[in-house]
């Protein structure tokens, strides 16, 4: 899929005007809160750049992340994305398979040594030499190390590759780990989510191509333009939270009135993502708008943080045995101490009488 | 495990275990203590012990006249603190949710604005109490580590709570974790310090009432 045309030449061949590109970069720049001069600079840089070679590795995953990116909301934008990058290896999207696919990957790695972007979705199995996920006879771990060696940067798409995700959930039968546990010497950009918002993936790629550097990342390696805001802070239901108006179940009056979902387990207050602002399916809606609390899918270990329906204020441990044991121990200690006192009293009486 | 995971899980479990064991140990060791026998006959018109106990408890809700002037600050500040804290603890929807989760009972919450106001009053009264403790020579002299530790473990959940509900300075998950941890610290200290008065106040006041009633002391 690689060629020697610049993005500008490639686009004009496909009948996409410079104006369209400028509109796209304006949209991207506003999405990422870049300064007003950025759209023009981005359009110029993009037009002159070669299409960015991208190698996409899929490990222990469900293909939901690929589903998300292929359904990015406007078909013309999706086209544009596939014009911006040269997707040289992607098992689900590429036409060839088997040995031919592996050859394509090798070729792209050689031609774009040190320049290609490695995208990873899915976690990496490490138990029993990684036999639980193998492609072309190679464990995911081997493939990742091989491909990461000459990559310019790594983008982890989805919570599985960013933080381990569902494969790493207890009891983690395959010994799944995120990319960052294996690759230590390359810049890694995490775009978590289950799946991530398509615009967060495409916007980050566009940023890298345009500026030739990584966007500003938060402490969990996520691009700040998309993951800088807390869902709760941007949630349209926030005024109900402030007023103390909460849905108590999914079909009560509060739920019908669209009140805050904190009490039915919404994790919005501790989740950083763009769902509340960008939304899904062309800005149609997002989980909270559809009446379900946020699961916190862009946060590490979201699967193992207790029930999705337990509120954030809840105590997460199993507690019946703990409370029972503590009560029994407390009463026993109190009774024992009182008994000792009685014994001392009786002894004192006896000593006085004798 | 993040700080919030630790706070919501193991920290609360340890704190509740220490709290329950400590409180029950102290209460049971106290109520099961052998009583000193009182051989004197009770006054004829003293009434039932239960009534005396209730009267004793009620009477101590307000200082006796000779002490009113000297304890007016402690009285006003004390009521402001306890009422403010009660509004915050039992009025905030998230707290009610926590209580419902543990005890299975709930009631409607109050708006965040009201809670914030009550929390600020509570904080101000705590600061006032500390200033008085440090400036009043007699109070300062009789204060021990227990008093200061108790003040600290009480003020920390109030401060972190105000920060959490208003998203001040730190990220929400860090604030919530600190708030829960400060509450856990309070639970751990509870049975061993002056906070135990929350339970013992019922015993001490009513016991005093019973003793006075039996002797015919008018209170």
Image (tube, coloured by chain):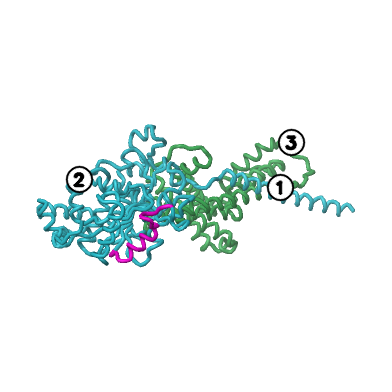
Residue depth check, mark 1 versus mark 2: number of the one nearer the observer: 2
Q: In the image, which lettered chain appears green?
A: B
Q: Quadrant of residue A117 in the image?
A: bottom left
| Residue annotated with mark 1 | A335
A117, B72: nearer the viewer? A117
What chain letter is assigned to the residue under label 1?
Answer: A
Identified at 55% across, 50% down, the residue is B13
B100, A42: nearer the viewer? A42
Q: State the CA–CA distance, disc 2 to disc 3.
A: 92 Å
Where is residue B201? Give x, y as percent. 60, 47
Where is residue B160? Give x, y as percent. 44, 55
Where is residue A308? Give x, y as percent. 43, 43
Specify few, some or many for label 3: CA neighbours under 10 Å numbering under 14, 14-19, or 20 or more.
Answer: few
Asked if labels 1 and 3 touch by Cβ distance under 8 angstroms, the answer is no
Q: What colour denotes chain A?
A: cyan
A134, A327: nearer the viewer? A134
- Please check the rendered image and state whether residue A134 is part of the magenta-colored stretch, yes or no: yes
**Which mark is on residue B44?**
3
Q: State the CA–CA distance, disc 3 to disc 1.
A: 35 Å
């Amino acid at each position: 899929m690689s060629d020697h045309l610049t993005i500008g030449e490639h686009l004009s061949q496909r009948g996409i005007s410079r104006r369209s590109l400028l509109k796209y970069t304006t949209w991207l720049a506003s999405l990422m809160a870049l300064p007003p001069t950025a759209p023009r600079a981005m359009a110029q840089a993009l037009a002159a750049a070669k299409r960015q070679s991208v190698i996409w590795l899929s490990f222990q995953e469900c293909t939901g992340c690929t589903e998300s990116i292929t359904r990015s909301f406007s078909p013309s934008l999706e086209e544009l994305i596939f014009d911006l990058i040269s997707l040289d290896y992607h098992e689900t999207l590429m036409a060839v398979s088997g040995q031919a696919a592996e050859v394509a990957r090798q070729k792209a790695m050689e031609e774009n040594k040190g320049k290609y972007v490695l995208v990873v979705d899915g976690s990496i199995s490490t138990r029993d030499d990684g036999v639980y996920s193998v492609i072309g006879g190679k464990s995911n771990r081997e493939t990742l190390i091989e491909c990461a060696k000459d990559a310019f940067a790594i983008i982890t798409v989805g919570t599985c590759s960013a933080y381990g995700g569902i494969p790493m959930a207890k009891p983690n039968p395959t010994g799944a780990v995120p990319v960052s546990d294996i690759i230590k010497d390359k810049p890694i950009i995490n775009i978590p989510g289950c799946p991530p918002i398509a615009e967060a993936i495409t916007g980050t790629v566009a940023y890298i191509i345009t500026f030739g550097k990584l966007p500003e990342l938060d402490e969990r390696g996520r691009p700040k333009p998309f993951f800088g805001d807390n869902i709760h802070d941007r949630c349209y239901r926030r005024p109900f939270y402030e007023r103390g108006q909460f849905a108590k179940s999914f079909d009560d009056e509060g739920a019908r009135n669209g009140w805050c979902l904190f009490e039915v387990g919404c994790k919005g207050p501790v989740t950083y993502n763009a769902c509340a602002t960008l939304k899904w399916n062309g800005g149609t809606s997002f989980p909270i708008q559809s009446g379900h609390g946020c699961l916190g899918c862009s946060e590490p270990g979201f699967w193992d943080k207790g029930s999705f329906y337990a509120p954030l204020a809840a105590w997460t441990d199993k507690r019946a045995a703990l409370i029972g044991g503590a009560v029994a121990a407390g009463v026993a200690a109190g009774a024992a101490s009182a008994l000792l006192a009685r014994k001392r009293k009786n002894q004192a009486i006896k000593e006085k009488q004798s | 495990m993040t700080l919030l995971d630790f706070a919501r899980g193991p920290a609360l479990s340890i704190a509740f275990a220490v709290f329950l064991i400590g409180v029950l140990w102290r209460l049971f060791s106290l109520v099961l203590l052998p009583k000193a026998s009182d051989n004197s006959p009770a006054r004829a018109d003293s009434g039932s012990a239960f009534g005396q106990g209730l009267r004793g408890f009620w009477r101590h809700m307000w200082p006796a006249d000779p002490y009113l002037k000297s304890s007016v600050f402690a009285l006003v500040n004390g009521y402001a603190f306890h009422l403010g804290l009660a509004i915050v603890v039992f009025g905030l929807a998230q707290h009610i949710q926590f209580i419902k989760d543990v005890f299975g009972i709930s009631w409607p919450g109050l708006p965040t604005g009201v809670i914030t106001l009550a929390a600020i009053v509570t904080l101000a009264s705590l600061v006032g109490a500390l200033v008085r403790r440090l400036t009043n020579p007699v109070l300062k002299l009789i204060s021990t580590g227990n008093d200061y530790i108790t003040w600290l473990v009480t003020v920390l959940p109030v401060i972190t709570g105000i920060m959490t509900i208003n998203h001040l300075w730190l990220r929400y998950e860090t604030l919530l974790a600190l708030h829960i941890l400060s509450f856990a610290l309070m639970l751990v200290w509870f049975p061993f310090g002056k906070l135990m008065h929350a339970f013992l106040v019922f015993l001490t006041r009513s016991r005093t009432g019973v003793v006075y009633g039996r002797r015919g002391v008018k209170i």
